[in-house]
Structure formats: C-alpha cells, structure tokens
Amino acid sequence: MKAAEFDYVRVASVEAACRALAEAGGDGKILAGGQTLVPMLAMRLLRPTLLVDVNRVASLQVIVAGGGEIVIGAGTRQSDALADEIVRRDLPLLAKALGFVGHVQTRNRGTVGGSIANADPAAEIALAALALDCEIVAQSVRGVRTIPIARFFQGAMTTALAADECLVELHFPAAPSGGGRGCGFHEVASRHSDFALAAAAVQLALDGEGACRSVAIAVGGVGGAPLRIDAATERLRGTTLAAEDLAAAAAIVREVVEPASDLHASADYRRRVAGALVERALLDARSEALAGRN
Amino acid sequence: MSQHEITFTVNGESQSATVAARLTLVDFLRDALRLTGTHAGCEHGVCGACSVLLDGVPVRSCLTLAVQADGSEIVTVEGLAPEPGTLGILQDSFWETHALQCGFCTSGMLIASHALLAANASPTEDEIREAIGGNLCRCTGYKQIVDAIALAAERLRGSNLPAKEAADDER
Amino acid sequence: MSAEPNSAFRYISRKRRTKEDHRFLAGNGRYVADIALPRMLHVALVASPYPAAHILSIDASAALALPGVKAVVTGDELASGTDALASGLDIPKVRRYPLAVGTARYVGEWVAAVVAESRALAEDAAELVEVEYEPLPSVSDPEAALDPSSPPVHADHGSNLLYRRKFVWGPVDEDFAAAEHRIEFRARWNRNATVPIETFGVVASWDPTAQLLDVWASIQMPKFPDQLAKALRLPGNGVRVHFDVDVGGSYGVKRGIKHSVLAGYLARRLGRPVRLIEDRLENMRGGDAHGPDRIFDMAVAFDSSGIIRSLRIRALDDVGAHAGRAPFQLGKPIGAIVGPYRIASVEYEAISVTTNKTPQEAVRGFGQSPTNFALESAVDRVARHLGIDRIELRRRNLIRHDEFPYTIPSGSTYDSGDYHAVLDKALAAGGYEDLVRRRDAAREAGKIAGVGIACCLEPSGGNSAFEPLFNPKNETTTWMDSCSIKVDLYGGIVAMMGTSSSGQGHETLVSTVVGEVLGRDPETIRVVHSDSLSALPSNSPVGSRMAIMLGGAAAGAAKKLKATITAIGAHRLGVAPEAAEYRDGDVMLASDPGRRLTFDQIVEIAHRKFHELPPGLEPGLQSAHVMEVPTGGTLPTADGRVQMYPCYAFEAHVVYLEIDRITGKVAIGRYAVGHDCGTMINPDIVHGMTYGGIAHGIGAALYERFAYDGEGQLLSGSFMDYLIPSSHEVPDITIADHCTPSPLTSFGQKGSGEAGYLGAPAAIAGAVNDALAPLGLSLTELPMTPGVLGDLIAGAG
C-alpha cells in the first residue's frame, strides 16, 4: 500500500495554494489533515499529480466570533475545534458532532474543512454544518465565492467545489444552547469511532410558549450525500414537539431518505434508525431549549 | 516525483534528509532512520500501531508524509526511555501489569498513553479508554493496558512532579 | 487434587515480570519487517479480480521496462520450479502453489509476483502487468458447493467435496428413540479470523556457496522448515529458519508457507535477498488466513429431567479455494465433542467443501470455538424447551469432579476437572443474582436485556491425532517438543527452544520452569530461540500446547541436568548420588549439609576437571529432552475413536448485556469468567491471554466477518470494514481462577492459549438470546451486528 508518485508543494498562503492548484490543471489536491486523503492515496484510489500542503497556512487555522457569526478556518484541526471555547459556547451542535469523529490521533490531524470537502455521506461534521446552515467560502485564482451549505453536497464524495478551488472558511451563525435554543446529535456506528450507520443532527429554537419557532434536521449515512430534511422541519414548526409530532417527523425522514444496503446494515435499517435518531436528537434539543428558559 | 530536503528532530536529535514526496513518515522512520520500534500495521490509519508524537501530539505516521515533518519535532518509542537500557515510568508500568503480549501494538499504545498523561494527571478509566481507542490490540483485550496507564498515572503523581514534566522527564 | 493454587513452588505460579516485555517496551523487538539485508529486493503481488477465471496470458513487458524492476514471476514458472504445497487430506488433485497456475480460484489470489528495488516501485510495476482472464462460473456458498451441479473449484478433483465422514460413537439411534424430547436447530458461524496487527512477512536469502536458504519469517507453523524445503526441492538441511524473529501476533493464522516458498524461490532465482511483507489489503484478501465458515445442523435428545442423552451434529465447513490443514479444523473438536457434559452417544458428520473464497487457515482453537458455540446453543435450547434454569441444567449434565479421568464417546479421556466448582466461582465473580435482578429491572423499564452463560473446554497439549483420523495415509502419532540446556564455564545457564513466539511468553515459561527445577533465579537464565538447523524438533506453539510440551521438555532437560550436577557433586564428595542432596545448584551430603560443593565448583569440574568427573560422564554441563505428547502414540480405531489432546482446561463465562431496541447495538455491562487451566506457570500471562481471547470472542460474536457478495467479491477487505474491537467495545473483565492440576504434566499445568475465545462467542450469543426471548425471537448466527439485530427486532413489531 504505497501511493503512486506525485509532486508536493507546501504553501504559506491561500493565494499560493490557489496558484498551485491552477497550475496543476485539475489534477492537484489540497493536503490538509490527510486522514482521508492519504489512505486513498495508499490504496491508489486517487492519483493526483500534485499535493498542495496547506498545513502551515496560519490564516486557515483560526476561529473567530463576531457579528453573530463564527468563522472557522477550514484548516482548523478537529481536536482544536473540539477544545475551543467559542465552539463549545456558540456552536454546541458542532462540538457534539466533533465528539463522534474518529479518534484522538485522527482528530489531532484531521481538519474541520477537510471533513466537509470530502463529503463522506456518513461524516458527522457535515451534518452539523447542514443543520446550522453554514456558509462555505471557497477561493481560487478566479476569485472568492460563498456557497450555502444546502448547495454544497452533491452526492457521495462530491461537492460544489471546483478542482481548482480551495475551501477557506466556514461561516456559522451563532447557535448557543439555552434561552429557548437547543441541539441534539445522535449516531449509531458499528464500533465507537466508525463512520455512522445512521446519524442525525438537530438545531432547534422554541418560542416563548414552548412551541417550535425553527428547527433544522440533517441526517447522514442514509444515501449519497448528507441530507437536510426540510419537510420534517415544516411538520414541526409551531408544534410543541409532542410525541405524535416527533413520530410524524420521523416518518417523514423515513420517507425522504433513500439509503442503500451494504455489508453493515440494510436500507430498511438505515431508514428506520435515521428516523429514530432524529426523534432522539429532537428530544435532546427540546430539553436543552426548555432547560435554558429557566 | 518531487524530492525534498527536510530538517527535523527525532528523539531530541536534529537531522536532515532528502525524501520523495510519496514517502510516509512511518516508512521514513523505519527504513531510512532504522527506528524500527514504530510499526506499520494497516497503512490506512485504523490500527494505530504507527503512532508517534509530532510536535508533542500523537498522530498516525502512516497518514503523515515524511516531507510534512520538515521543521518538526518527532518522538518515537525509542525516545521514551530516559537512557538506553532503562524504561520510563509509563513503560515500567506496562511491564509491571504485563500490558502486552506480542508487542506489535505496544509502541503505539505507549505514545497514545504518554500524550494522555502529559495532559491529564488523573485520567478516569473512560478517559484512558478514549485515549487508546484508536489503537487496536489483538492480544490483551486492553485490560492490562488500562491497568498499566492507571498505575503509571498514580506513580507519576507520586513522583512529586507535575505529570507533564514527569512525562517529559521520561524522554 | 487441590483446588488451591499450588504454593509449593518457588517461581511457578508467582507474580513475576516476564522476560520478553522489556525489549518490546523499549521498541527493541525484532520483527520480520525490521530485518534489512544488503541488496534486499521487495515483492508486490498481482491479484485476481475474479473469483474464478482462466489465466489466458500475462504480459509483463511494461512492468519489466520500469527501472529498478528485477523480475515478474508467474504461476507457470513457479510450478515448474517448485513442488505443490502440502495438503493435509489425501486429495492429490487439489494442488496449490503460491501463485495461481492456469486458473485463479478466488478474488485476491496471487497471479504474479513483481520484484523490485523498493516496495513502492514493485507496486508501480504490478499495476502495469497485463493479465488476460476468461471469467468462469464460481460458487461462494458452502451448501451450493455441495450440489454436484455447482461449478467445481478444482476441476481435476471432480467435485467440491473435500472430506465427508459420519462418525457414530455409541447407540445414537437407540438413545434418540428412547429420549423423551428431541429438538433440532441450525447454528451458523460465519467467517472470521484472528487478523493479527502484524501482517505475515518473510525475508529469504540464498547462499549459493553453502547451498543454504536463510529464512526469517513471522511464522507459527508446525513442520514449517521441512515443508518449505520440500516445496523448494531442497534437502531439509538446505533451509535455515531463524526462530529468533518476534512474531507480531498470530493466534493460529501465521502460516505463510506460500509466501515463504515464493520468497525462497525468488531469492534463489535472483541471487539477492528478497522480502515479502503483506500489506493489509493483500493480507485480508490473499493472505490465505481466513477462519472457519461453518454451518451446524444440531439434533439433541434429552429427558424431562434435563439429562442430555445423545447428539447428532452435522458440521459443514467451507475452507475456501484451497485445503491445506484447514479441513482438520473439523477434526480437532472430536476430542471434546460433548463439551464438559456427560453425553453417552454422539453422531458427528464432518463435511469439508471448497468454494471460490480466500482459503481458510488455523484459527485459535482449531475449530473448537465454533463447536462450543453450537454445543452451548443446544444446551440453552434444551433448558428453554423444558423450562429449566440454564445453570441448573448445566449442573445436571456436567461431568462431576469424582468422575475423572472421564472417557467420552469419541475416545478421548479428559484428565481432570472440577466443573461445578468453577461454574460456581464464575457466577459469584459475575454477581449472577445481581445480574438477573438488573436484567429484570431493565426489562421492566422497557429495555432488551439478557444474561448469558457458557461452559466449555479447552483441549490442550496439541498432538495431531486428527491427521491419521482424517487421512489414513498419514500415520502421525507424535507431536513432540524439545528443550536443551547448557551451563557455561562461569555458571551461566542458557536454555534453547526450537520455535518462534508470537506473544505467548515462552522465554518466561522456559526460564521459570528451568529455574524452578534447578533452584536458580529465572532472572539469570537466558532463553534463546534456535534456528531450524541447530534446534531439536518442535511442533511450534499450536494446539494450546507450550505450557505442557515446552514446559515439560524444559522440566525434563532441567531434571537431567540436575541429576548430572548431583552425580558430579556426589562423586567428588565420595558418596553415591542417593546419599547426596541437590539444593539450588549446590550438592551436599544429606547427612551432613556442611560437606558440600557449590554450583560454581561443580561447573568448573564439568568444564575443566575431567579427572574429577564420575566415570562415563561426558565433560561439559548440558542436557536435552525431547518430549512426546502425554497420552500420544496410538492410531485411531476403525470407528474413529482416538485420544485427541491430553489435557482439558475448563472455563465458565457469565455476561450481561443490553440491546438497543432501535439500533440493535449491544452494550456489554458485565463480563466474568471462571477459568481452570491447572497450575499457572505465570498468572499474568495466563490472564492476559484470557482477556485477549475474550476480546477476540467478542469480535467473533458481534463485529467481525469476512463477508462476500453474491459474486464472490470480498466486502470486508480492510480495517474500515473488518471490525476489530477497540478499547471501547471490550469491557472490563473479571477472571476467577481455579486450579485442578493435570495428573499428566510436569507441574499440573494445562494449556491456556485459547482461553476466553473458546467460550465468549457462546456466552454472548446466549445472552443475546436470553434478551430476545421475551420478544419471541432467537438468533443462532454470528456475528450479531447492529444491522442484524436491529432488523430482527423490528421484524417482531
């Protein structure tokens, strides 16, 4: 398991990374944490001609809060994000999701942006990003653009990023729990740290009466791309998230998702469990939101 | 295929080398530097046998390119003992509880638990299991490893040094 | 026989640090991948993408054109330069070579070997080898393979049936007819293996002047040097296997004979050292190290009182595309075919079939763990059928302490045991009553919870009696092991063993035993792994045998050395040896301990003063002992009765678990095991292997499977999909020790290398079924993954 040959360049700025990608003419790959890319190279499932190492680009490893928004540099290590006070306070859903990602060693190298850019259907960070409605900033020699997360994932392992684009920042609206807001993240994996057989992320806001003001639901492991279930959102809005509301939302989830069977679980299993995990995540989110009101 | 000049520190010793872009850190450590205490178990980032400290942080050396270690400080299992022929407190605790059999995963276990104890002087059993959760062992069922790390934590606390310094002292 | 740990020993059974751990902890182990020879070349393999295909042509020109590529070798070339690999069964038309010859028979089978200056380069070149295939129909299901119309995996052999024999021991028909109750069921043990963290590797170097092939390998295999030499058409003394290579885990599977023949052939042909280290993908697909893949059809005859009268077992095992020793894994369980129970008659039909899947190799227990799973499933079902408590039912059927030695219908005599006592200890250690209350409370709260119990035997001492049983042309009745000891001029003791170790702590074993017998501190005794040219015969650490066989050989050699030392001392003291007393190396007059010779004086006499040696004694101070397996030496009877292994360790498992109603995930809440392997030479080592065996059993029960799709493609060919339990999946485990010494061994020891693994899958399956019972569900197929359990529970509504 040795990678096929490639060239390597380490860059000190996003601009340099973009130039290198442009020069590689579509055959370049950004090397961030490498926790997904390097195994694929070793198995020769990917054969870029050039790796552009952005690990020393300081501007990609910042977490900044301001104006109701949290900006996370795409190269931020998952372990750094997990330990970050801003993330824990303002993006508890992301923190919950990060706790399910890999192991200590892979989180020490793996990056928040890298996980999003890989678009594994079962990756956790993508679900939090979907539920939190994050925006993705991508840059190339052609310029900078912002991509709403809802349009980012296009299928298993495919995204809206062009081959010459570098993912730069993730912009999250602040979503602290309490004061009527809460979140939940549930996952089932074969072993503790495996990719999800099914996973659900929920971000919820209640109004003063305890009714659902807004809710975002994302599920993973159940199809080509991480998926937001807006139809379930519609069903829940204005309700008190009573048992029948949760059951109805779960039923919608089961209808909407189109999972495939594989070695680890049947399509039926994934569909059924995705619905149940959404219910569990909604319950967690509701109790956080209600607790915060006291 | 690009070749790259790199300079780095391994177990306290500064070195330089020329490496091919595709060479992984584990192959570089083992084949070029002949530091064979670090093992390649799966080469796709699951088993953890290849764990090393990169700038103080435990990482998989099969998922890191050698060229990426340029300018970095690397610690391998060979760098954990205070001097040749001796063992550090953590290693000695592994011996005391017989926390290994075939020894193949052991260097990775030591690296993972060394990093844990440097950051957490009194880990709970759950924290110990989390710290070694990415290191597969096929011999022990983990029990004597968990016991060893708890024993090492206790001994390090008893050594009247902050755990971080005591753990650093072991190098 | 005492039930207490034997305190008569000075070093044996004491908490003592191992000899081996220090070097591993320092990063100083020496594994095969650590061996780097000058001018060494590297191998990568071209593998078949088809489960069955004719190989029409192989074009290596592009690969050979790459600078640094030294050779591309095909199966045709290898078949003309080597002999076929040994087969256990008498099936001459099922031929196996390291590379496919003419036909590829499974996905991942090696079709060509590429040799280059580096492994990366060899992989680059392997991609350039053009193989033209003609795909053939294939079969991957064992029952389909039995159908005469199925595509034959080995066309010359004529069918996919490799072995079939129905053994009948005792009046089975009569017992079934007379029994008050009968049940039947099927148990399915799907394919898994031990999957060590180190893959298999070998380095071979040919010396044309000495005509000698040096081999370093991560090997755990009986007769490996002999088989290697034979396949390479070399004399036995033309191969030197270095047993001082540390093996990074094996638990049975490290039998890389095909890798080693290939590497040896390449080293000779190219005149340079050759290294072949499997990468993980090669290991999982083409390493030929999968485990049993077995369907049990069980019938049980029993009375209303719960007494089990008779068993009918049909075991169909899928060995994959080649046979090797794998079919014997149906034979070894015959030595404990009734488990720890008094069952008067048994019918056992053993069927081995070949399919287009990766070949099977020996796995920890050699077929015993699947058999124990089927037996314990039967016992639980009998209890449920009768409404009798599972523990009470076991107590009624377990062989009693006063019934040993006890001969079972298939001809083996169990040496000793106290099964009721060990079961009681396990229940106490697990807090059984509390677990039942916890289960019931969990059920009250709407959870799915269960308690599992399993009792089983670990046959140990590993002879190879299944060889003559399954292949009458093979008259093997010994499976000896050896140890030699020498004392140097200054009194340093060196003990030599003739096999490699894969974590079992043999240096600790030998030094402890030799130290015990000689009264010398084991710390001061050096133990070395000889090479195959200098070693006395060994059959390697298989069949849970080394405590008995290597320990026994070491004790035998040490006793001879002790007698020699005593004779020298007595002679110098002018008395008969009977009048002298040996104490910690010194020899003194029994009647006057003040008159003595010290160990150092006796060593000096032996090495320098021939004139002071007793007449007829050789100079120097050394001894050797080659040990036959206790109870070995006889061929099977015509009706297939034979003494299989000599010693029988016992274990009783207690486990509590809960299953998530929606996700089907199992959470183990408590695990305890009572374990009796006689005298433990080193308790830490025995406990370690037991914990590890349970972890491995948890993997087999809940996580691990080499799964194939309908087209014969392996679905779990990496660590992403073959799921080995981590520290999160393996719970804390409590072991309750018990000691019923074996009357057959040097210190009362029995084997323990398979401990835990032999009962854990059965115990977990029992707990899952206890949990499912209130839902009216049952499941007798492993592994019980979240996907399987989730679907099953959902199906119940």
Image (cartoon, coloured by chain):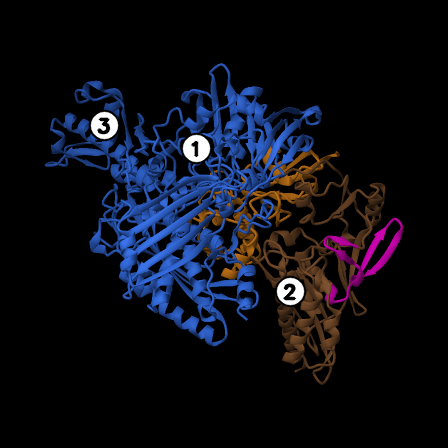
Chain colours: A brown, B orange, C blue
Q: Amino acid at mark 2?
A: Arg
Report the mark closest to the observer, 3 or 1.
Answer: 1
* Residue under pointer 2: A271
Is C400 on the left-hand or right-hand side of A271?
left
Mark 3 and mark 2: span between their CA atoms? 80 Å
Mark 3 lies on a secondary structure that is helix
Question: Could you tell me residue B100's position as x and y percent?
Answer: 45, 46
Mark 2 neighbour class, 10 Å CA radius: few under 14, some 14 to 19, many 20 or more: many
Task: Estimate the x, y position of residue C190 in percent, counting from the top left.
Answer: 49, 50
> Which chain's residue wears label 1?
C
Name which residue type carries label 3: Ile
Q: Which residue is mark 1?
A: C91
Q: Chain of mark 3?
A: C
Local SS, label 1? loop
Depicted C580 relative to depicted A221: above or below: above
Up the image or down, C546 lies above or below A285; here it is above
Left of C44 or right of it: where is A118?
right
Q: What element does badge 2 sit on?
A: helix
* Dot 1 and dot 2 within a common chain: no
- Residue C314 against residue C637 in the figure, above or below: below
Q: Nearer the viewer, mark 3 or mark 2?
A: 2
Q: Are marks 3 and 2 in contact (CB under 8 Å)?
A: no
Residue at 49%, 44% in the rendered image: C147
